[in-house]
Image: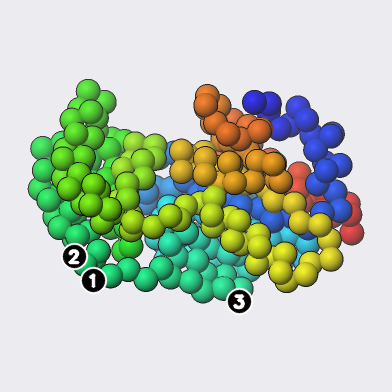
Amino acid sequence: MEHIFRNWETLKEKLRGKYLFIFLDYDGTLTPIVKTPEQAVLSKEIREILKILSENPYCKIAIISGRSLEDVKNKFNLRNLVYSGNHGLEIEGPKIKYITSVSSGYRKIINQIKDELSKKIIPFKGAFIEDKGLSIALHFRNVDQKQASIIKTIFHEVIIVYLVKNKIKVKPGKKVLEVRPPLEWDKGKVVLWLLARQKFARIKKEILSVYIGDDTTDEDAFKAIQRIGITILVGKTKGSHARYCLRNHDEVKEFLERIVKLQKEAI
């Protein structure tokens, strides 16, 4: 995997003159990894860059996050962005509004799992449950790492019956385990769906997709567009399907600044 700035002279020619559809993860990509979700705050500088890009007629920005739709929207509050929450179970943006419908039975199961997990993780300082409406997530980043394997065992003991009956799906991330509806839907399928919609809008320029993410959940998107777009992993580069890498969210900011400059030059 190569650092994207080392290939910038070649890449900027590939980017020049294209309609760019830029897909961005939130936590760990646009913000640093922090102890709790509430601490991940978007900087004013990155927000302004995204505002500039989203107002460009030849650029579209989509936030592809595991957070709930309402949560991720509140982080940006920019009307021209496409927001995808819960790994694509909820999508909203200009002329788009989609929420996955789930059965009352699924909601009952989610609540049962949430209640049982909440009781069992009480002894583990730093572990907590995040309720995202259509899904729940067990966070254990702040747990003593010697206890992480115990947390994982407890999680699997609670969900295994529902999992084998295909009542739920489980999606692991960085120090988080998520329970989701039993659907074949992930960040990769979301990206391909949004790209298809954009192509159907008959944009005159060729569309080039760019996906930037840092988590294992972003690998589905890397695989989905690795032959048709530019895929960028943020952070550790071992075992990823991404073609390029950036070290941290500061370098993501620099990359987006370079895109702004490149598009200004094209005007």
Q: Is residue 62 above or below residue 247?
A: below
Residue at the far bottom in the pictured view: 95
Spot occupied by residue 146 in the image (x, y as percentages of width and height): 22, 23
Residue identifier under label 2: 108
Amino acid type shown at disc 2: Lys
**109 or 178: which is nearer to us?**
109
Tag nearer the camera, 3 or 1: 1
Callout 1: helix, strand or loop?
Answer: helix
Identified at 64% across, 46% down, the residue is 225
**Direction from residue 213 to residue 184 in the image, left or right:** left
Q: Quadrant of the C terminus?
A: bottom right
Element carrying mark 3: loop
Disc 2 or 3, which lies upstream in sequence?
A: 3
Q: Amino acid at mark 3?
A: Lys
Residue 53, can we see it? no
Q: Are marks 3 and 1 in contact (CB under 8 Å)?
A: no
Find out whether the residues at labels 2 and 1 contact each other: C-beta distance under 8 Å: yes
* The label number, if any, that marks residue 104 in the structure image: 1
Label placed on residue 21: none
Q: Position of residue 152 (x, y in %)?
A: 23, 35
8 or 42, nearer to the observer: 8
Position of 263 compared to 144: left or right? right
In this figure, which residue is indicated by the disc labeled 3? 95
State the CA–CA distance, disc 2 to disc 1: 6 Å
Question: The residue tagged with tag 2: helix, strand or loop?
Answer: helix
Q: Tell me residue 218's x, y (percent).
A: 51, 43
Describe residue 259's horizontal placement relative to residue 158 as left or right: right
Please tell me how crowded label 3 is: few (under 14), some (14-19), or many (20+) other residues with Cα within 10 Å: few
Place residue 13 in its image quadrant. top right
* Residue shown at 53% from the left, 63% from the top: 83
Q: CA distance from mark 3 to mark 1?
A: 28 Å
Depth check: 153 or 115 in front?
153
